[in-house]
Amino acid sequence: MEPLKKHTGLVYPLNRANVDTDQIIPKQFLKRISRQGFGQFLFYNWRFDEKDQLKPDFSLNDPKYTDASILVAGDNFGCGSSREHAPWALQDFGFKVIIAPSFADIFYNNCTKNGILPVKLTDEEVQQLIANAEADDYYLTVDLEEKIVFDSTGFEADFDLAEYPREMLLNGWDEISVTLSHSSKIDAFETKHTVH
Amino acid sequence: MGKPKTVIEKIWDKHVVHHEAGRPDLLYIDLHLVHEVTSPQAFEGLRMKKRRVRQPHLTFATMDHNVPTIHRNVIKDEVSKKQMDQLQKNCDEFGIPLADIHHKHQGIVHVIGPELGLTQPGKTIVCGDSHTSTHGAFGALAFGIGTSEVEHVLATQTIWQSEPKTLNVKVDGKLGTGVTAKDLILAIIGKFGVKFGTGYVIEYTGEAIRDLSMEGRMTICNMSIEAGARAGLVSPDEKTVEFLRGRKYAPKEEDFDQVASEWLDLATDEGAVYDATVEINANEIEPQVTWGTNPSMCIPISGNIPNPDNAETESDRNEINHALAYMGLEADQPISTVPIEHVFIGSCTNSRLADLERAASIIKGRTVHPSVRAIVVPGSQSVKTEAEENGLDIIFKDAGFEWRGAGCSMCLAMNGDIVPPGERCASTSNRNFEGRQGAGARTHLVSPEMAAAAAIEGKFVDVRSLPIPTA
Ligand code: SF4
């Protein structure tokens, strides 16, 4: 995966809490057997009507957000299933960073394993970012080395990310290769561990 | 004796392959369950890097999400068929045991694991599916993983995990007659919300949990993820041991008692400390019905739909308004007046033999309301066979239910079993998200008994108020 150190991009505000993975990528699109091409189905039931026509009233369909790469949303983003198709769809659509007050655990993990940076900010900070992005074209910079988010008008907030996923993201490492470098430990463990 | 430990800590400590301060531990995985939807890209990844599956015999695959529940010989949906064929191919190539659509053990992955005795106390269990938490009912540490992690476990039989915080959900008291494990877990999520478990592994404790059957415990642990917890478990006890005795992949008779005593030692020690505890009393719980678009939006059958004007915060008000609009409901309406068009009895939450027996006891001698279409989808082919041996299929069919083959079916509506837009379904599954049972479909989560009662009445009704069946 691509290393992600610092990213500046247009913000798309989605002012909803508990956005679940069935919304991010509805199940009728989970039948593909490759990782690519899920972006077109992102938020499908919100973006498209029953006749598969774009719904003009859903904000992400507004051309002003076409180039957005930072998604800012409400609490408990990504709750529900473990489907990694959710981060694949977000990434394929163009999102590199997701900011929310909290995330569902599995989704959070799935993001960091795919080179998407999930950023937890406080409720107030998120509300401010959403208000800014709803008011006008709004750009943010996320710096993973410094663990800060800032804009050009003085907003600045720091965030936390555990050291291990941070390293993976910064370096774009393949986790399996990292683990296989511990092979001898796994071998040793297996000789003394019984599974009935 | 050392410091008292929780069952969670005991299992964890036995599985750490590599530990370094300030980093996640490398944890060994004892059982990896695989299904057709979240695995193709993982196998593709292995192939691209020329990697093998480290322990095919600790891996077990089945087909559940996509499989049709009728006319199973011809898979009409080309894309589903491709996904199933791909799983077959992957299992052949990598030497993984597979219960395919025609296998007598095929079924929902979380139903067949326990049924075959693959699920055992003390095991670490993963699957590319968030309801893997179900297996925690046996005192196993079981959690859902994404596809990248599926690939990682296939290649290394390990996973990087930070030791979780522990949360004790303590349920004292006794559930009343007609009040089930499903009502209990809905009431817990209703009271504490959809994210109170985030970052934790839950252990369910207390009298009401000890009193539950293994099936009831599975229903509870299954929905841990709906509370945000990746895993939820119950300490093993005699019920756990007896459930597993004699199962296909359980330890052989001659070793069984020895292994069983090791299992019992895993139970949480007296005086062990949790990072957090919440409590709820079972005595007060009524049958529950969800009214909204996440499982915490639930009320007792005697209750009314919430009014957004009473919401405490602006964002709660928004959520209620969204949910009411999607669900086509009015604020303050009694839930018992809401008519339904569909009933689904099935899913990894409530599709085991005991669930079907309890639903059948309500259905027996009655008929499905004329405006309702009702289906029963057994959790596995073994459940189906056993139910048929006991004549349950006849009870359901005589009442007007459709009796299907095993799979996930209308729980997530990937296989063509869908609820049409705007229509309402009483469902024994675990998620009432928008579009879960079909675009625009309106889902109400209930227990099998409550679903059966709703099928008969054509609306939600307190199952405890139905006269005892005559037939
Ligand atoms: S029955 Fe439903 S919740 Fe359970 S594994 Fe299948 S789709 Fe997931």
Image (spheres, rainbow, N blue to C red):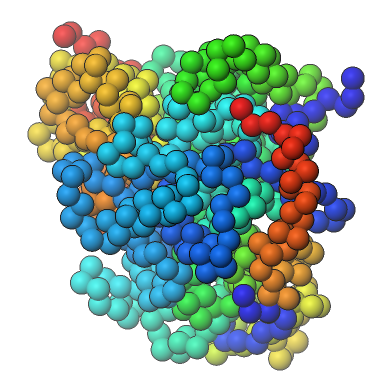
Dividing the image into four quarters, tell me where ligand 1 lies.
top left
- Residue at 61% in and 72% down: A116
Considering only vertical position in the picture, is B255 above or below A65?
A: above
- Residue at 41% in and 42% down: B98
- Residue at 18% in and 19% down: B395
Counting from the top left corner in percent of width and height, residue A108 is at 61, 60
Which image quarter is the N terminus of chain B in?
top right
- Foreground residue, B427 or B381? B381
Residue B120 falls left or right of residue B302: right
- Residue at 62% in and 75% down: A1
Instruction: Let me know if residue B44 appears in the view.
Output: yes
- Foreground residue, B442 or B285? B442
Rendering quarter of residue B231: top right
Which image quarter is the C terminus of chain B in?
top left
Residue B382 falls left or right of residue B146: left
Counting from the top left corner in percent of width and height, residue B419 is at 23, 49
- Foreground residue, B437 or B246? B246
- Foreground residue, B58 or B164? B58
Instruction: Let me know if residue B347 appears in the view.
Output: no
In the image, farthest residue toward the top: B470
Number of labels in the image equals 0
Counting from the top left corner in percent of width and height, residue B32 is at 55, 43
